[in-house]
Amino acid sequence: MTQNSAATTPLDLPRFPKDFLWGVATSAYQIEGALTEDGRGQSIWDRFCQEPGRIARGDNAAVACDHYHRYREDVALIADLGVGAYRFSIGWTRIQPNGCGAPNPKGLDFYSRLVDELLARGIRPTPTLFHWDLPQALQDAGGWRNRDTAKRFTDFVQIVAGRLGDRVTRWITHNETFEHSILGHVVGTHAPGLRLWTDAFPVVHHLLLSHGMAVQVLRASLPRSTQIGIAQSMAPARPASERPQDRSAAGMLDLLHARQHCEPLLLGRYPDELAAFGISQSAIVDGDLATIAQPLDFLGINYYNPHYVQAAPPGSPVPLMPAEPPAQYERTELGWPIVPQGLTQMLLELRERYAETLPPLIITENGMALADAPDADGRVDDPRRVRYLQDHLLALRKAMEGGVDVRGYFVWSLLDNFEWADGYRPRFGLVHVDYPTQRRTPKTSYRWYRELIAAQQ
Ligand code: FCB
């Protein structure tokens, strides 16, 4: 595969299986806005955005894409794309403003209306139950460091399943337990902004435990045919050089990322090497690993790029640190290297590692940030995104030809949106959002994706 397949049209892409699922993804906090409406409570991201210096240019998500009010228009855009599924997330504090107790009917009504609107247009709703917006009240009680948060989460899941389970047939428990634990609790660049270093293990464990508990709740209350999974990020860990210390740093990153966040789910155990790494596992209670390792109908994979890593200088709080990607790779607006073959490699490796227990896979996120802007005619032309998506789909097809069972692909994202600590400048959407007017403009990539999907039918 080459990096320069710009001339390829959708029709030249290899065919995907007939029932392959095409989708598009968003998350609640990044698009909804309306943070103080209809009884919604404060989340850790509301608090984080209020702290000076946390978010680029002082941006916040108070309005975002105003999706809370414009969801009908957005569902029409999803429907016009021709996708079969829409991945969104449920804002916990709309349902339980303080993370516990009686549900807020207005919050439930919003997601119920969204689900109905999707179903009326033939789109299968695929909600994520936790996409990083923990109720602040639960954070005040220790957040994911506190085992009780896992119990609170299952209460929330029970409420949501009770209201939407008659219509929602595919669920995702968590989004990226690795990123939420490391960015939010190890390096502190995401909410809740903690720097716990190696003391962050209870966060990882309680996130994974709450996943298993949520699967149990969903299975007990929903029909047998309901599909349940989790969306985990995967990024091959690549050493900055062939020096033994850099290779060992890449091994550590692989351990802390892919292995720590997959093996409990797929093998029912944490990798032994974690203990040698100085991570105390005292948060684990007997029976937890069996709870975590619930059978999954699918494993969601979010892929953006490999992570380049090197050994940290002696005396650093952790022995590894990020490295610059090799200069040969083109970068996105966020500086992320564009390496489609990393997707093929990662999928083949996953299958090799976990052959016995790996469920079918769905790519639950993939996409690129650009600084898109309308031209003089008001059109938003993003050929680099078209090429990115095309090359990643070719890379995905290659892995499938190599025997990896992948059932679907979701583009991140439907709309330009609030990209967490990076604010609004990086634009990931197939649809451009002019924030002052909230005008939506489908980009060239939107039309390309629509043609691609149509050509696969
Ligand atoms: C992923 C997140 C998603 C979005 C993309 C760009 O890590 O799950 O919310 O921010 O990155």
Image (cartoon, rainbow, N blue to C red):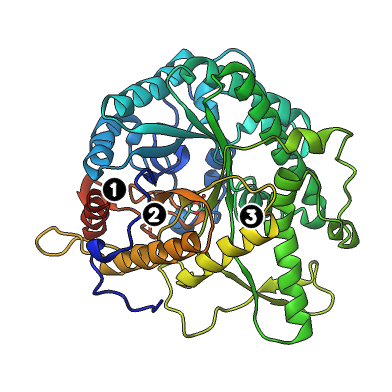
Distance, label 2 to label 1, CA atoms, is 9 Å
The residue to which callout 1 is attached is 435
Q: Residue furthest left?
A: 377
Q: Give the x, y percent position of residue 112.
A: 40, 20
In this view, 180 is above or below 106: below
Distance, label 1 to label 3, CA atoms, is 27 Å
User: Which of 59/431 is in front?
Assistant: 431
Q: Earlier in the sequence, mark 2 or mark 1?
A: 2
Q: Are marks 2 and 3 in contact (CB under 8 Å)?
A: no
Is the CB of the residue bearing disc 3 within 8 angstroms of ligand 1? Answer: no
Kind of residue sitting beneath label 2: Tyr
Q: Give the x, y percent position of residue 359.
A: 60, 45
**In front: label 2 or label 3:** 3
Label placed on residue 424? 2
* SS at badge 3: helix
Q: Earlier in the sequence, mark 1 or mark 3?
A: 3
Kind of residue sitting beneath label 3: Leu
In this view, 355 is above or below 389: above
Q: Give the x, y percent position of residue 5.
A: 31, 75
Kind of residue sitting beneath label 1: Tyr
Q: Earlier in the sequence, mark 2 or mark 3?
A: 3
Is the CB of the residue bearing disc 1 within 8 angstroms of ligand 1? Answer: no
Tell whether 68 sits left or right of 103.
Answer: left
Please give the count of numbered marks on the rendered protein. Answer: 3
Q: Residue at 24% across / 74% down in the picture?
A: 7
Distance, label 2 to label 3, CA atoms, is 18 Å
User: Which of 390/50 is in front?
Assistant: 390
